[in-house]
Amino acid sequence: MSEAVYPPESVYNSFPKTEVQTQKPQRYISKFRPTVILEEKANKEAMRTMGPAKVEVAPPDQYTKKHFKESKLAKKTEPSKEFCHSCTVKKPPVPARTDNPPMGIHTKRDFIKTTTLAPMKPLPTCVDTSKGHKQLLENSGLVPKYIKKKDYGEVPEYLLQRNEEKQRAQEDYENYVKEQKEQGAIKLMSDKERQALLEGLKNNWDKLHHEYQGLSLVTDTLSKKAHKERLEAAMKQLEDDINLFEKFKTIYIPNH
C-alpha cells in the first residue's frame, strides 16, 4: 500500500480558520418592469379567440349568391328629349366642291406636320480594317473639305512676309555693294581668277587627303590623334570654301 501524504506540520494549522462569506450585490430590476408586464397581459387577453370577438352575421335571407362580389357598372341612363332639342345653333353646311378653301386656318393635322421632325440620317463612316473598325468619314482625310475654304489656293501671309523680308535684304545688299563700288573699296573677281582659286583649293584638298590616307589605322598616341584631327579640320574647311566658290559666281573682293 502507498503511504499517505500529510501536509507539513505548522503552528498555523492549529488555529481555527474563519470562513469569509462574500455578499452578492442586489440584482438589477428595471423600473419599467411592471409596465411591460401589464402591456403583455393586455395583448394576450385581446388575442385569446380566433379572429375578432364579435362578427356581424348576415341574415338567412341574404345568403351569398353567384357573382355577388363582382363589381357592377352603373346603369346607362338615356338622355331626355328636352336635352336633345335644347341646342338651337345649327352647324354650317358642307362646303361645295367649287368653293375655295379658307386660308390662314391651322388645323390639328397641320400642327402635327410642323412639329414632327425628319428622321435622323446615319453619319457617313469609313471602314479601315477587315474586322470592321470604322471612323467618321470627315476625320479620315478622304473628304476634300479644304478646297472649299475661302482662302484656298492663296499664298499664306507668313510666306508673303518672308518673301518681303528676303527681297528687302537683297535690296539692302545690292545698295551696299553699289556704294562700295562707287567708293572703290571692292572690285569684282573675274572668272579666270575664280577658276584659278578654285583649282588651287582642290589641289590643296588632294594633298591633305593623300596625307590623310597615309595615316596609320591605329591612333594609339596623342600625337597621332591630334595630327588626324588637324587634317580632318583642314579638309572640312577646304570643302566649305570649294562649295562657296562653286555656288556663287559673282564674288567681290576688297581693293587693297
Image (spheres, helix red, strand yellow):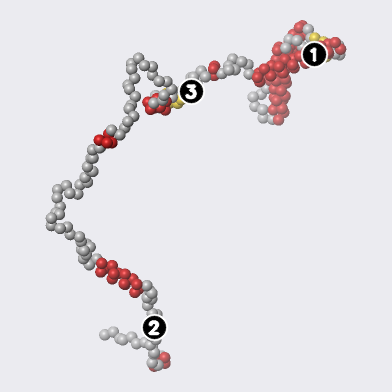
Left or right, residue 147 beside residue 133: right
Residue beneath the point at 22% across and 63% down: 52
Q: Quadrant of residue 202?
A: top right
Residue drawn at point x = 25 percent, y = 35 percent: 81
According to the image, label 2 marks what residue?
Answer: 23
Tell me the SS state at disc 1: helix
Q: Which residue is found at the position 67% from the left and 17% from the top?
A: 160
Which of these two is toward me, 113 or 220?
113
Is residue 239 visible from the viewing direction of this image? no
**Left or right: 52 with respect to 170?**
left
Q: Which quadrant holds the N terminus? A: bottom left
Q: Quadrant of residue 200?
A: top right
Q: Quadrant of residue 26?
A: bottom left
Residue at the disc numbered 1: 175
**Residue at image mark 3:** 138
First in residue order: circle 3 vs circle 2: 2
Element on which disc 3 rests: loop
| Callout in the foreground (1, 3) | 3
The Cα–Cα distance between marks 3 and 2, rounded to whole angstroms, is 96 Å
Q: Mark 3, residues whose alpha carbon is within 10 Å: few (<14), some, or many (≥20)? A: some
**Which-is-in-front pick, marks 1 and 2?**
2
Q: Amino acid at mark 3?
A: Glu
Q: Is residue 76 left or right of residue 211?
A: left
Q: Is residue 39 above or below residue 175?
A: below
- Residue 7 — which label? none
